[in-house]
Amino acid sequence: MALGRKGSRGIVVDGTTYRWRLRRRPTYCQALCWSPCTYAVEHAEHPGTTLVVTTNRPHTGNWVGRPGSPVPPSDVADAIGAALRQGWIPTRAGSPFHLDQSAGFSRGFSSSL
């Protein structure tokens, strides 16, 4: 499934252009901080397999007030590099390639709430 162009951002990694997109609004589970923020990446010119990256941070639009931080392009570039090293072939059609970087994410409410 290809990413929509609306809301996606371009990034160049090792001379190759990719597009990535983070959901503007969190999913229900992300809004309650039951699951971390995710974003999708695809090859810009010849989209094939989509890379789905699970971060270790809450979505900035969560409903429970947990502090979140935006995903910087440097993290996206690092994730693309890691996925390529793990066998992601962005121009080949297939099921989404999942890259789990959620180590350290704590689910649910924080103790200060």
Image (cartoon, rainbow, N blue to C red):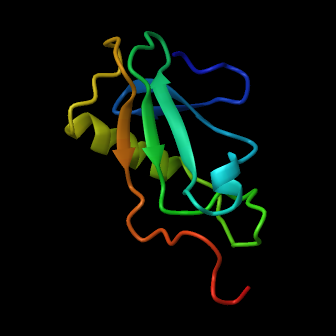
**Left or right: 97 as drawn, with respect to 52:** left
Residue beneath the point at 54% across and 16% down: 2
Residue extending farthest to the bottom is: 112
Residue 70 occupies quadrant: bottom right
Please tell me whether residue 86 is drawn above or below residue 5 in the rendered image: below
Please tell me whether residue 54 is drawn above or below residue 96 in the rendered image: below
**Left or right: 89 as drawn, with respect to 65:** left
Of 74 and 106, nearer the camera is 106
Total count of labels: 0
Residue 53 occupies quadrant: top left
**Left or right: 88 as drawn, with respect to 28:** left
Name the spot of residue 111 as percent of width and height, x first: 63, 88
Identify the image quadrant of the C terminus: bottom right
Name the spot of residue 73 as percent of width and height, x first: 54, 47
Name the spot of residue 110 as percent of width and height, x first: 63, 81
Residue beneath the point at 21% across and 32% down: 87
Residue beneath the point at 48% across and 62% down: 56
Name the spot of residue 106 as percent of width and height, x first: 50, 72
